[in-house]
Amino acid sequence: MTSTALLTDRYELTMLDAALRDGTGHRRSVFEVFSRRLSGGRRYGVLAGTGRVLDAVTRFRFGGPELEWLAAEHVVSPATIDWLADYRFSGSISGYREGELYFPNSPVLTVEGSFAEAVILETLILSVLNADSAIATAAARMVSAAHGRPLAEMGSRRTQERAAVSAARAAWIAGFAATSNLEAGRRWGVPTMGTAAHAFTLLHDSEEEAFRAQIEAMGADTTLLVDTYDVMSAVETAVRLAGPELGAVRIDSGDLPVVVQAVRARLDELGATGTRITVTNDLDEYAIAGLAASSVDSYGAGTRLVGGSGHPTAGFVFKLVERADDDGAMRPVAKKSVEKAGSGGRKWAFRRLEDGVAVEERVVVADDEPTLADARALVVPLVTAGTPDPAHVGVEGVRNAREHHARVLAELPPDAMRLSGGDTAIPTVLR
């Protein structure tokens, strides 16, 4: 088991050290993850990474190498080193289901335990949720812009190698159909796809030889990349070799609406009316929307997707909202900083619907979960006494998240699908 314990900031451990010294580290505490606003004026956000957080928390262990390094660097005191040697998160985590939509001030994750055992999870939790949710939100907008046409995630070469795996996972949760990344397929059950790049064509003495080799290896239903040299010549060669059974052609450059129209016309003239057209080339939701009237059958998105389509973080923060006094009584706490003022107290969230359409995100401050007859409860148990709910982790967790996302996205009003910046799809009301 690979430890996640040092995937954190130094000040998490120095806070821990000081709190253990003065006795406040053992106070029961409630931490909340939320975003003050949605990046880029987006109308909704998509929560992703929850299952990865739960897995990372179970692997947050300080073994010999981690403890030896902390001691050698004098990060914390010997007494805290001893405390960390026995660390196991034994508290509880609740929050929105992965794949759920969120809005400003939605309490997407709540961590409860002693201050000491909860505070050191801050950096790890935020690093996962901020990246994965940014990608899932961008992916959802691309799926919306595609209007039912499938999308493939192809961003592995445009990000860090481990981030590529989590990006593929997040995109699939948000509705992408497949990924090019094999590790995402093995680890998370995401369908994989891919055929050949320009290098394969350049390897051969002619484009015809390259196409013939690919067809012999993969069958006539393969996708041939037709823009290495001359697109129209390549299309003619592809149909001549594969026949009208040619699966698809891929276009990765040029003025895509114009090129797609010409390729569709030529394929039809050649009798390949069933051959699909897929396009790539640094697509984002706006480029995909611009191709809505074109004869595109599918899309591949990479560079823009793995960067959150210009917004690489969801802007989540991890804040203490309630803690115990010396007598054990719980006290709401919150920052009063300018433009960063918080709201204290343990929170629960509900989505109010009218005729099946979401109209309000209602956040309620209460020690125990209330019941709202006219709204859907959003907060569910994720970790109980340190043990994650199996429904939210692993391949099953990813599958459940994808299904949940599709259900809740259908609740949004039509205006939520607009790509332009503006007000959130529904207001958040704190009570």
Image (cartoon, grey):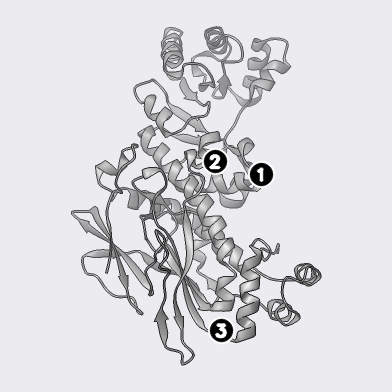
Q: Amino acid at mark 1?
A: Glu
User: In the rendered image of this protein, does residue 260 appear above or below residue 290?
Assistant: above
Q: Identify the mark nearer the N-term, 3 or 1.
A: 3
Q: Nearer the viewer, mark 3 or mark 1?
A: 3
Q: Residue at x 61, y 85 (%)?
A: 22
Indicate the position of residue 251 as horizontal and vertical percent values.
Answer: 52, 20
- Give the CA separation, mark 3 to mark 2: 41 Å
Side (left or right) of 24 relative to 217: left
User: Circle 2 is placed at which residue position?
Assistant: 306
Indicate the position of residue 99 as horizontal and vertical percent values.
Answer: 43, 54
Q: Residue at x 33, y 37 (%)?
A: 420
Residue at far front of view: 338
Secondary element at image label 3: helix
Indicate the position of residue 70 as horizontal and vertical percent values.
Answer: 75, 69
Residues 389 and 41: in front is 41
User: Circle 3 is placed at which residue position?
Assistant: 24
Residues 124 and 155: in front is 124
Q: Residue at x 55, y 7 (%)?
A: 233
- Give the CA separation, mark 1 to mark 2: 11 Å
Residue 161's disc is 1
Question: Does the residue at mark 3 contact the one at mark 2 (Cβ under 8 Å)?
Answer: no
Q: Amino acid at mark 2?
A: Val
